[in-house]
Image (spheres, grey):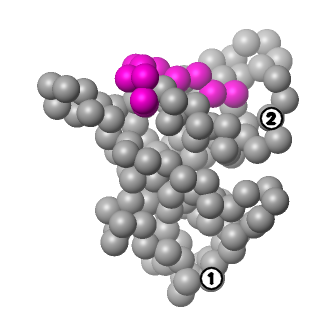
Amino acid sequence: MVVNDTIADMLTRIRNANTARHQIVQIPMTKMTKSIASIVKEEGFVDDYEIIDEGLKSYLLISLKYKGKRKQPVITSLKRISKPGLRVYANHKEIPRVLGGLGVAIISTSQGLMTDRKARHNGIGGEVLCYIW
């Protein structure tokens, strides 16, 4: 299956696995999905991720994180902001705060992917890819 928007595909797969309370979710690997996975792990939204090579194809296995006895997902919501049909850019002064700083915006900058906090700190803007909280 060929997907045009790999980021939206990744977010949807995580969202669906979260809703179904799955422990792990498999995502086709690209440089972009790998860097998003590492940011999401750094921010504590997922436990870990590993890379599985199957010949020509590589996959990311992301282990999701739940809290409490009732296994509430740590990720409440994932939202794609900049889409292939409508790109959204922001300079470092305009970078949005997600839920007053509780959530994370992932920004694609000239220095690679980073969180909104880091981009603001470094004083660089870029494309606002998605929000996670």
| Viewer-closest of 130 and 126 | 130
Q: Residue at x 67, y 45 (%)?
A: 7
Residue found at the very far left of the displayed protein: 69
Does 1 sit left or right of 92 as displayed?
right
Task: Work out whether residue 79 can be spotted.
Answer: yes
Q: Residue at x 62, y 82 (%)?
A: 91
Magenta residues (range):
18-28
Q: Which callout, 2 or 1, points to the residue nearer the camera? A: 2
Quadrant for the N terminus, please. top right
Label 2 crowd bin: few (<14), some (14–19), many (20+), radius 10 Å: few
What's the residue type where badge 1 is placed?
Asn
Image quarter for residue 31? top right
Q: Is residue 21 magenta?
A: yes
- Residue at numbered disc 2: 3
Label for residue 53? none
Instruction: Give the answer, above or below, for where 118 lies relative to 29.
Output: below
Q: Residue at x 58, y 31 (%)?
A: 13
Label located before the other in sequence (2 or 1): 2
Residue found at the very far top of the displayed protein: 54
Task: Work out whether residue 63 can be spotted.
Answer: no
Label for residue 91? 1
| Viewer-closest of 119 and 102 | 102
Residue found at the very far bottom of the displayed protein: 93
Does 104 sit left or right of 83 as displayed?
left
Instruction: Give the answer, above or below, for where 126 lies relative to 37.
Output: below
| Viewer-closest of 90 and 31 | 90
Instruction: Give the answer, above or below, for where 73 lies relative to 95.
Output: above
Percent position (x, y) of residue 3? 80, 35
What's the residue type where badge 2 is placed?
Val
